[in-house]
Image (cartoon, helix red, strand yellow):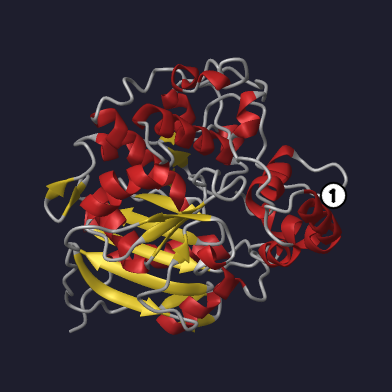
């Protein structure tokens, strides 16, 4: 999901409401017109600080229960949060957090919590939407399935696991190429609504808002645009295909596999959930953008990645997989002109030039930022506005860099 989704969804919401009512009449088993109207307000900047929480109240979802002992997170020496300077303004943490639309922020240093803050009436029990940070979680699950030999090789083709994909543009794409967002399919992450909606907009409305189809269904018939592996093209549909491959390879629903192979072994302190697509009760986990968890459990994920796939000393992700995920392919000069970030690995971003640093990134300012050089993990959960100011992400990353260098309080 791209930033362009924001004002497209908001601008379309009023115009689409009558259509939603019509869809409800045609498919009484689906969500009511009232629920659809609420879903259309999900990204409304007037209320998104709250609508980005506990989305299971409004959307279809699949529970990911926790199990076993929780990974205890110790408190370290409190961090002296840095001052942020921009132009003529000099802001402390509170000013920076307000300016950058922060709902919650947690910093870990050497595996210990050194700063934790909940804002706007959220707390440690609040479940926040990850948006596309879920893509990084999907890559972790692919690594687990590979380690279990349920996926034989990253160079297998998608159609080897999901035969329905063989006839379309994904037919020749390998799992590795899809992980790298280089499937070559003819898809644009562009959300144009109205009388002639784009494919991405159609999928969003029919799969997520109205629950009439599954997010990955268009992957069966989509065509090719470029040779697989040749061109980076950010596509949530690619990640949806990875989720489909995982379910076929493991023989398990994604929420079940997530719970038993990742969430339980991670030592999560709270249950989580995937949002779901399709008709109620029959859809698939929205693994491209729909994971919801509490702040500390997102921090556990970041710490596990920093520790090479180990959680509380136990190897959860196969050794070496995080290294593969975070080996970045730099963007070409042409793409770099329009890209906010520097490169891409396996469903994971290089967001800056800090040596070895990487990040899970989600729409509207969601970050799990890992800085190996200082053994720092930063989780920022946000509610960015529809059209993000050009200064916003640079100022967020600049403050992240300052955090990594900040000392403990004297």
Any part of residue 190 in sight: no
Residue 332 image position (x, y, % from top left): 53, 32
Name above or below for residue 192 compared with residue 410.
Answer: above
Name above or below for residue 197 compared with residue 251.
Answer: below
Instruction: State the residue in front, 306 or 90.
Output: 306
- Identify the residue at the far right of this view: 195
Q: Residue at x 52, y 47 (%)?
A: 286
| Residue identifier under label 1 | 194
Q: Residue at x 13, y 48 (%)?
A: 314
Residue 33 image position (x, y, % from top left): 75, 63
Q: How many marks?
A: 1
- Identify the residue at the far left of this view: 313
Any part of residue 341 in sight: yes
Looking at the figure, which quarter contains the C terminus? bottom left
User: Is residue 34 found left or right of 78 in the rendered image?
Assistant: right
User: Is residue 94 found left or right of 57 in the rendered image?
Assistant: left
Q: Residue at x 44, y 40 (%)?
A: 347
Residue 77 image position (x, y, % from top left): 17, 77
Residue 380 image position (x, y, % from top left): 42, 66
User: Is residue 310 found left or right of 190 in the rendered image?
Assistant: left
Q: Residue at x 61, y 20 (%)?
A: 169
Label 1 Cα neighbours within 10 Å, binned few <14 / some 14-19 / many ≥20? some
The residue tagged with tag 1: helix, strand or loop? loop
Instruction: State the residue in front, 93 or 383.
Output: 383
Name above or below for residue 197 compared with residue 81.
Answer: above
Instruction: State the residue in front, 89 or 278.
Output: 278
Q: Toward which corner of the image does residue 245 lie, by quadrant?
A: top left
């Amino acid at each position: 999901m791209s930033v362009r989704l924001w004002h497209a969804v908001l601008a379309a919401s009023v115009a689409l409401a009558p259509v939603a009512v019509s869809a409800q009449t045609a498919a009484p088993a689906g969500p009511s017109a009232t629920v659809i109207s609420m879903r259309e307000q999900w990204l409304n900047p007037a209320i998104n600080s709250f609508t980005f929480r506990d989305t299971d109240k409004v959307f279809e979802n699949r529970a990911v229960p926790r199990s076993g002992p929780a990974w205890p997170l110790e408190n370290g020496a409190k961090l002296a949060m840095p001052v942020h300077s921009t132009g003529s303004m000099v802001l402390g943490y509170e000013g920076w957090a307000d300016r950058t639309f922060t709902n919650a922020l947690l910093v870990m240093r050497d595996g210990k919590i050194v700063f934790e803050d909940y804002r706007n009436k959220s707390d440690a029990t609040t479940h926040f939407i990850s948006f596309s940070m879920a893509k990084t979680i999907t890559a972790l699950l692919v690594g687990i399935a590979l380690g279990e030999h349920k996926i034989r090789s990253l160079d297998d083709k998608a159609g080897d696991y999901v035969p329905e994909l063989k006839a379309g543009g994904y037919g020749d794409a390998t799992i590795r190429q899809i992980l790298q967002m280089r499937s070559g399919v003819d898809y644009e992450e562009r959300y144009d609504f109205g009388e002639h909606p784009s494919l991405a907009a159609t999928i969003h409305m029919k799969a997520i808002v109205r629950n009439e189809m599954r997010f990955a269904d268009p992957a069966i018939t989509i065509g090719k645009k470029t040779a697989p592996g040749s061109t980076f093209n950010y596509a949530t549909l690619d990640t949806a295909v990875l989720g489909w491959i995982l379910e076929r390879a493991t023989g398990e629903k994604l929420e079940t596999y997530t719970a038993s192979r990742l969430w339980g072994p991670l030592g999560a302190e709270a249950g989580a959930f995937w949002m779901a697509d399709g008709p109620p009760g029959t859809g698939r986990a929205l693994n491209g953008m729909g994971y919801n968890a509490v702040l500390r459990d997102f921090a556990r994920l970041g710490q596990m990645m920093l520790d090479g796939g180990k959680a509380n000393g136990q190897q959860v992700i196969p050794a070496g997989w995080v290294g593969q995920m975070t080996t970045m392919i730099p963007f070409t000069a042409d793409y770099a002109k329009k890209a906010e970030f520097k490169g891409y690995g396996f469903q994971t971003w290089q967001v800056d030039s800090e040596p070895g640093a990487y990040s899970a990134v989600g729409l509207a300012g969601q970050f799990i930022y890992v800085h190996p050089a200082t053994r720092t993990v930063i989780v920022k959960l946000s509610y960015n506005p529809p059209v993000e100011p050009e200064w916003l992400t640079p100022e967020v990353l600049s403050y992240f860099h300052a955090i990594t260098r900040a000392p403990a309080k004297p």
